Image (cartoon, rainbow, N blue to C red):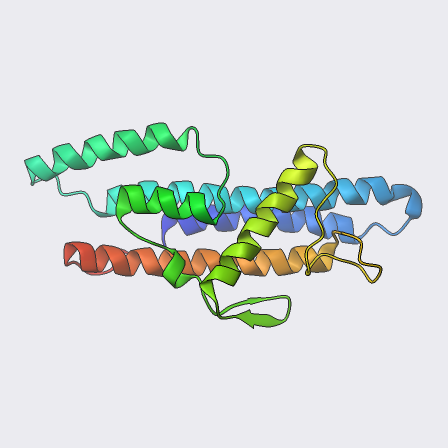
């Protein structure tokens, strides 16, 4: 069982998969600019899926913890939710710090301890710090081409000459990474809600 927010993530991620599928079919050098555009759009959509997930998950917390019969609690609960909804309108960079700050502020849930032992580029990343760094690198890569800059070279997106690149294999890795991040965050918040409110896990 998983959150409704994860369902939103999966739906958006499917769009990224479709863009990547179209890019993989392009072989002619003359069509290379189109392939690059599709790959960039696919990564942007993957990031959009993560962004939408974090936003939806923070709101789902309030649905899962609502207690209409407790008038005093409901008043505070609803006020905090209104503040969250206002902040979400300005939330557009779902990097590791911003995700943690948002969830901590409104749900008291710290996702960082759940972000470990995640597979990326054929390696298991056991360190939460290293996982956070990769998430931030993905966000910076997406930010670079969205604003017309050259894409940065990380250890996971360099070709044999050391130049920064983006291809379907790399996008497959970023996809699997974000899926694991979603799963870990989903399970972590469900356990947090159960402990925080003394109830069974909401999903």
Residue beneath the point at 36% across and 31% down: 87
The percent coordinates of residue 129 (x first, y second) are 48, 60
Does residue 81 appear to the left or right of 18 in the view shown?
left
Work out which quarter of the rendered image holds the N terminus and state it: bottom left
Does residue 89 appear to the left or right of 170 in the view shown?
left
Location of residue 124 by image quarter = bottom right
Examine the rendered structure and indicate whether residue 24 appears above or below residue 47: below
Q: Nearer the viewer, residue 190 or 95?
A: 95
Does residue 158 appear to the left or right of 136 in the view shown?
right
The percent coordinates of residue 136 (x first, y second) are 55, 50
The percent coordinates of residue 158 (x first, y second) are 75, 57
The percent coordinates of residue 75 (x first, y second) are 13, 32
Location of residue 2 by image quarter = bottom left
Total marks in image:
0
Examine the rendered structure and indicate whether residue 69 appears above or below residue 132: above
Residue 1 seen in this snapshot: no
Work out which quarter of the rendered image holds the C terminus and state it: bottom left
Residue beneath the point at 51% across and 60% down: 131
Residue beneath the point at 67% across and 32% down: 147
Residue 196 seen in this snapshot: yes
Residue beneath the point at 77% across and 53% down: 24
Q: Nearer the viewer, residue 101 or 25?
A: 101
Location of residue 162 by image quarter = bottom right
Does residue 4 appear to the left or right of 51 in the view shown?
left
Examine the rendered structure and indicate whether residue 186 appears above or below residue 49: below
């Amino acid at each position: 069982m998983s959150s409704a927010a994860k369902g939103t993530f999966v739906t958006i991620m499917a769009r990224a998969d479709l863009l990547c599928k179209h890019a993989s079919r392009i072989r002619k050098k003359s069509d290379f600019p189109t392939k690059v555009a599709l790959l960039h759009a696919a990564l942007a959509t993957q990031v959009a899926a993560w962004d939408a997930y974090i936003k939806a998950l923070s709101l789902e917390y309030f649905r899962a913890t609502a207690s209409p019969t407790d008038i005093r609690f409901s008043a505070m609960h609803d006020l905090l939710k209104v503040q969250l909804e206002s902040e979400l309108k300005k939330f557009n960079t779902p990097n590791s710090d911003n995700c943690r700050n948002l969830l901590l502020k409104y749900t008291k849930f710290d996702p960082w301890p759940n972000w470990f032992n995640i597979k990326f580029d054929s390696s298991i990343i056991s360190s939460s710090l290293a996982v956070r760094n990769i998430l931030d690198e993905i966000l910076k890569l997406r930010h670079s081409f969205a604003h017309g800059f050259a894409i940065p070279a990380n250890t996971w997106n360099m070709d044999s000459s050391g130049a920064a690149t983006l291809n379907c294999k790399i996008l497959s890795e970023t996809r699997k990474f974000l899926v694991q991040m979603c799963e870990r965050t989903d399970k972590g918040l469900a356990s947090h809600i159960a402990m925080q409110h003394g109830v069974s896990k909401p999903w």
